[in-house]
Image (cartoon, grey):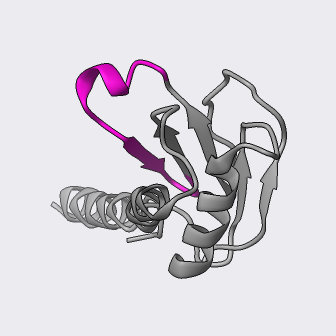
Amino acid sequence: MLGMALAAAMAMVVGGAASATTNGIARGAAVTVRANPDNAIVDATRTAAAHVGLGAVDAVGFQPDCSARSGRVIVCRNPALHKNGARAVTLKGPNWCVVRTDPRVGGADHGVNVMTRALAKCISD
């Protein structure tokens, strides 16, 4: 009996720890934009990051890689998005966030609005 009670208590502790995991990134986290520095998406991302409380934004040149990096937000281009009508898709996990954007999203007000909504979804629950 005692063994079963101990096993049940341990299951509750383990289950509680697993459910405490949050997805997303903390405010102040850095943002990497995988686009050329002169691309309008970089300016839109800088403005949007400031609006939602994220940290410095670095442009590293175009890279088709959209893989996540722990502790930061990755913004990348996904040409398939515009075919489905999406402007940006936010994916997040424990201490990471990836925002995939339609290549037509630029730096005008519309681009800033799209990026503000997308980056806001990156903030930890």
Which residue sits furthest front?
Answer: 108
Quadrant where the N terminus sits is: bottom left
Percent of width and height locating residue 59: 80, 48
Percent of width and height locating residue 83: 30, 19
Is-magenta flag for residue 50?
no
Q: Kindly indicate the quadrant of the structure image that contains residue 63.
A: top right
Of residues 77 and 121, the one nearer the viewer is 77
Magenta residues span 79-96
Q: Relative to residue 86, is residue 120 depicted above or below?
A: below
User: For the point 67% across and 66% down, which residue is it?
Assistant: 46
User: For the point 32% across and 67% down, which residue is it?
Assistant: 16
Q: Relative to residue 80, is residue 100 depicted above or below?
A: below
Q: Relative to residue 98, is residue 103 depicted above or below?
A: above
Percent of width and height locating residue 73: 63, 54
Looking at the rendered structure, the number of numbered marks drawn on it comes to 0
Of residues 45 and 38, the one nearer the viewer is 38
Q: Kindly indicate the quadrant of the structure image that contains residue 67.
A: top right
Which residue sits furthest left?
Answer: 1
User: For the point 65% across and 49% down, which residue is it?
Assistant: 40
* Left or right of 115 in this view: 64: right
